Amino acid sequence: MLIGIDASRAATAQRTGTENYSLFLIRALLKLDQRNRYRLYFNQPPASALFPPVENVEVKTMPFPRLWTHGRLSWEMATQPPEVLFVPAHVLPLMHPRCSVVTIHDLGYLYYPAAYTRWAKWYLQWSTSYNARAAAHVIADSEATKSDLIEHCHATPGRVTVIYPGYDPDFAPVRDSVRLAAVREQYQIPSTYIISVGTLQPRKNLTRLIDALAALVNQGRAIHLVIAGKKGWLYEPLFAYVQQQGLEEHLSFTGYVPQEDLPVLISGARAFVLPSLYEGFGLPVLEAMACGTPVICSNVSSLPEVAGDAAILVDPHDTAQFVQALCHVLDDDELYRELVQRGLRQVMRFSWKKCAQETLEILEAVGKTLQRV
């Protein structure tokens, strides 16, 4: 069959979680499946090395000034539809085949609406409900997201399947001292530090982590926090808060870090911290474990599923728990080594090959079932 995929997010220059999900899952699907034909839809010309040329893959670039999904992609679906459409990281176009599958990554806006602009919250509410209603089948990143879809969007349980993402195999322990030192110098950070990675936005709960940093500094600890990630919505108060706390010398904002530098930065850290209030999956947790860096993360939403017993889980609203967890990792070498080994074992449960295989089964099943109707 002909499977169409909205690959527009995969071509984004500065990719974060959902864009990386789109890129690596599409790559894994194309590598795995030589039986079906694929048509990849882009809103801009993709980089030549984004996907390797394959005989059963057609690339269709369709530039459009505004409303690409509901305008240009909808028109393509109305005039030249594939047999199955898969949207891995966005919203279904208004015009779409009956055999359409979409991945819904999270419903964080329901739990922390104040962390979103009015427009962003409205669009997320609309697009998530629309996806859950219009798709023939929905893929969820986690059991937590599936439960949210059933409870809040009234999704039919049998039409939602949990398929865990994988992680980029480039994330692996970096022990080359020269390379580690070069990247530290590039980003102007000291030799001993802790790190957090994610888009700067209120849902990431970074002010709580900054409070924990302040408490450790007040204890007289020589500690440095690196926050890596591009600016998201409502990010401005975060910079002002650091200044109010007088922590400029103890904290570095790197901005967006290219994919080739991120494993080095994470590998060089004493600990990785993800204090998020809500995550649909929490891919940085896997990336940090794959780099051999101990993980401290929140005990909410999907994060316990991802972390298993390989991380220190804390209440994201409790600064004291973050302080205590950081002290344990900083001071206890035996615990440090145990978390490293547990993390390296935990990530073996996740792979893009497995994700692609399970996704392909859904795409083929949807196509065959609805074609018989």
Image: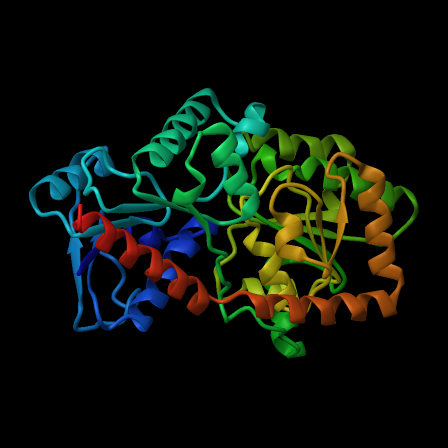
Instruction: Looking at this view, name the residue that lies furthest to the front.
Output: 373
Question: Which residue in the rendered view is the most extreme toward the left?
Answer: 79
Rendering coords of residue 339 (x, y %): 76, 65
Locate residue 185: give its quadrant. Answer: bottom right
- The mark tally for this picture is 0
On-image quarter of the C terminus: top left
Asked if one can make out residue 185 in the rendered structure from this viewpoint, the answer is: no
- Colour mode? rainbow
- Residue 137 position in % (x across, y down): 34, 45
- Residue at image position (62%, 29%) is 237
* Residue toward you, 173 or 111: 111
The quarter in which the N terminus is drawn is: bottom left
Residue 124: percent from left, percent from top:
42, 30
Q: Please, which residue is most extreme toward the right here?
A: 219
Q: Please name the residue shown 47% across and 55% down the image.
A: 163
Horizontal placement of 162 versus 137: left or right?
Answer: right
Using the rendered view, name the quadrant where residue 294 is placed: bottom right
Give the residue at x 21% y 42%.
98
* Camera sees residue 23: yes
Above or below 171: residue 307: above
Which residue is nearer to you in this view: 292 or 138? 138
* Image point (61%, 68%), residue name: 290
Q: Position of residue 164 (x, y in %)?
A: 50, 56
Answer above or below: position of 360 versus 114.
Answer: below
Q: Can you say whether 217 is above or below 115 in the image?
A: below
Q: Is residue 94 left or right of residue 161?
A: left
- Residue 293 appears in which quarter of the rendering? bottom right
Nearer to the camera, 64 or 192: 64
